[in-house]
Amino acid sequence: MDLVGISLKDAILEFQFTCPICSLVKKAVDSSIDTFFYELVNDVGLRSELRSKRLCQAHVQRIESYLSRHMELSFMSLAIVYADLLDHLAKLTEKSSKSVQDGICLFCEKERTFEMVYLQCFIENIRDVFDLYSSSESVLCFDHYIFLSSKLKDPLRNELKHVQLLKYQRLMNLLTSYINKHDYKNRENFTEEEILARKTAGNLIAKKCHFWRRSG
């Protein structure tokens, strides 16, 4: 198994109630953001690519959040990016009043690539990772489960479905307990698992609006 496969196994074992694919993609995108700001000043090609593809709102917020946690990168670098893009858009505005249809956001493209790499790795190593996933505390988000299921054949597809339903049921039981404990008569404390289930469930049900879903 290559390094991608090893990373996938580690992600399956590492986090409770978290999608391993989502975790790996997030880590890879964060690394790309870090590299982006270190290379931005001297990489003319990167600046040109950024002007062409621009940034979506979600990744602007993601970059802002990342920089707030990594002050060594400096918000000045982000200001340089914004100034450069605004200058580019101002020139486009002068040339034409028509809307310009740009390509996919620079980081959406990277995220899509990382996502497909890890999904493909899961499929190619299904025999190795299935038992690991079944016995782990990780939970595939709905969209990644649907994608993987669509690429498998029976009996593996039904086995994955069975495991996924068991994981969902456990989460639902923890959330139900969390909800019930809000009753004014309750004197029990929330368990760590109940609190974690409440914090992670949103990411497991959230729709992933990435290219692979739009392109079908």
Image (tube, helix red, strand yellow):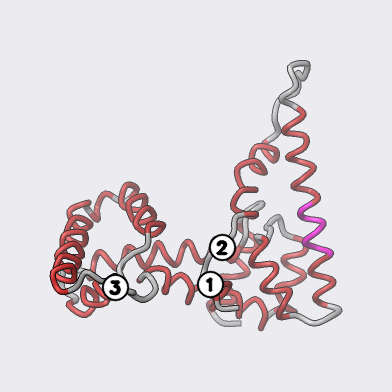
Position of residue 177 measured from the top left corner of the image (x, y, whole percent):
77, 34
Amino acid type, residue under disc 3 in the picture? Val
* Disc 3 crowd, CA 10 A, few/some/many (<14, 14-19, 20+): few
Residue shown at 36% from the left, 68% from the top: 32
Q: Position of residue 159 (x, y in %)?
A: 84, 71
Up-down relation of residue 201 to residue 53 (above or below): above
In front of the other: 77 or 209: 209
Q: Secondary structure at mark 3?
A: loop
Pointers 1 and 2 in contact (CB under 8 A)? yes
Instruction: Name the residue beneath numbered marker 2.
Output: 208
Q: Which residues are magenta?
A: 162-168
Residue at (19% x, 76% y) in the render: 43
Residue linked to disc 1:
115
Which quadrant of the structure image shows residue 184?
top right
Looking at the image, is mark 1 or mark 2 nearer the viewer? Answer: 2
Find the distance from the CA under tag 3 to the CA under tag 1.
28 Å
